[in-house]
Image (cartoon, helix red, strand yellow):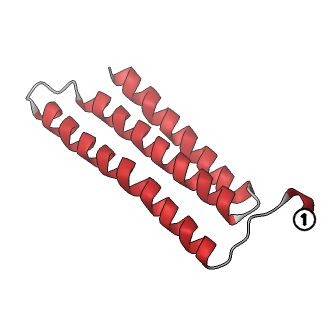
Amino acid sequence: MDLLGYILISTGLVFFLGTTIGLLRFPDFYTRMHAAGKGDTLSTVVILIGCICLNSTQEDGLGLLLALKILLIINFILIGSPTATHAMMDAGNKAGVVPRRKDSE
């Protein structure tokens, strides 16, 4: 179970790296926000599931309690992160940020 936890945490860190590269390389506000919203949510959830795997081997019963708390955190992230990304994209749209067009290069 520990090996699975380490693999999941490492995978989440690779997704965070992909999110960072997307934020730096994508051409406009909307594609950058898409990379940030998707990558941040996915990588955080994968890392937290890895933490559940690492702590599930505790014998004193605290592993289950910690797993339930981490599952609540995952629930809040799955609700809050896409909502925040949508709100920022909506604010950018209302502020007049135009997406980059292929013919405007």
Residue at image location 43% in from the left, 55% down from the top: 81
Q: Quadrant of residue 23?
A: bottom right
Residue 21 position within the rendered picture, expressed as x and y whole percent measured from the top left: 67, 51
Residue 68 position within the rendered picture, expressed as x and y whole percent measured from the top left: 19, 38
The three-letter amino acid code for the residue at tag 1 is Ser
Residue at image location 40% in from the left, 41% down from the top: 45
Q: Secondary structure beneath disc 1? A: helix
Instruction: Name the foreground residue: 40 vs 63.
Output: 40
Measured along the vertical axis of the image, is residue 29 above or below residue 40?
below
Instruction: Name the foreground residue: 4 vs 102.
Output: 102
Task: Please identify the quadrant where the N terminus is shown.
Answer: top left
Residue sticking out furthest to the left: 60
Residue at image location 17% in from the left, 27% down from the top: 58
Residue sticking out furthest to the bottom: 95
In the image, taking residue 8 as reference, residue 54 lies left or right, namely: left
Label 1, on which residue? Answer: 104
Q: Quadrant of residue 72?
A: top left
